[in-house]
Amino acid sequence: MGIDNKVQVAQIVAVANDNVIGYKNTIPWRSKVDLNFFKQATMGFPLVMGRKTYESLPGSLKGRVVYIVTRDKHYQPEKIKADGVHVTHSVREAIDAAKSWAIVAGVKVVWICGGADIYKAALPFTDMIVKTTVDLDVFGDTYYPTLDEWDWYPQAPAETVKDGDLTLTFERFGKNRRENKFFNK
């Protein structure tokens, strides 16, 4: 029997112009507003992230449970940065484990938090994307996948705020669940 589908899988991501999300395993900008938004949105929920993303965290994820995805079968995190840390070996395994935890905890969202490979691999399982666009041209070596506009629709009007010299636009997208007449005969 499958995991309860009432638990949504949501991606939370901050991108600069051209969908840049990182450079040399760091975020190439600093925004207190976006960090606070991330903390408020994810507090109390399970998070799924790749090993490099987890290791790059500068601080703690207290109040959250983290499911790390790695291909390394012997990986053990050096530092525990959350209330619970679990090592998994595929995005599907991490999502299923996080959904099981969410059901027991009584929460309705599993957050996908990066990096690029994890975001891409999780897209087929994702119900919602919460995206912050930082209006900034930066050099990057890591990018968020380009979304097919046929697959995603805005769930609410975009909200734009200033954080010092940065302009941030917060958007929320839902997955289109329409049936394809050509393939579902």
Image: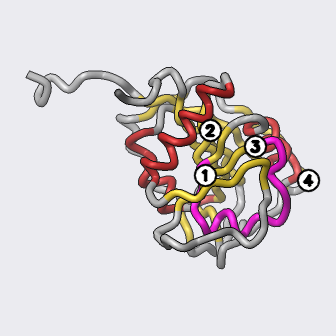
Q: Is residue 155 left or right of residue 127?
A: right
Residue 102 found in image quarter: top right
Local secondary structure at mark 4:
loop
Distance (Cα) linking label 3 and label 1: 10 Å
Give the alpha-carbon distance from disc 4 to disc 3, as whole Å.
29 Å
Residue 127, labelled with which disc?
Answer: none
In the rendered structure, which amino acid carries the disc numbered 4?
Answer: Gly
The residue carrying mark 2 is 130
For residue 64, the mark is 3
Circles 2 and 4 in contact, beta carbons < 8 Å: no
Magenta stretch contains residue 56: yes
Residue 67: x %, y % from top left: 61, 52
Task: State the quadrant of the C terminus.
Answer: top left
Which of pointers 1 and 2 lies earlier in the amino acid sequence? 1
Dot 4: few (<14), some (14–19), or many (≥20) neighbours within 10 Å? few
Disc 3 versus disc 2: distance between alpha carbons?
A: 18 Å
The magenta-colored residue range is 48-64
User: Whole-percent x and y of residue 37?
Assistant: 80, 41
Q: Residue 164 carries which label?
A: 4
Q: Which of 67 and 175 is in front in this view?
A: 67
Secondary element at image label 3 = strand
Instruction: Work out whether residue 18 can be spotted.
Output: no
Residue at image coords 53%, 42%:
97
Residue at point 64%, 69% (across, down): 76
Q: Tell which circle, 2 or 4, labels the residue nearer the N-terminal end.
A: 2
Mark 1 and mark 2: Cα distance apart in space: 19 Å
Could you say where residue 71 lies in the image, as x and y percent from the top left?
Answer: 46, 69
Q: Which of 61 and 32 is in front in this view?
A: 61
First-in-chain label (4 vs 3): 3
| Residue 152 drawn above or below residue 123 | above
Q: For marks 2 and 4, give the CA distance.
A: 22 Å
Q: Residue furthest left?
A: 185
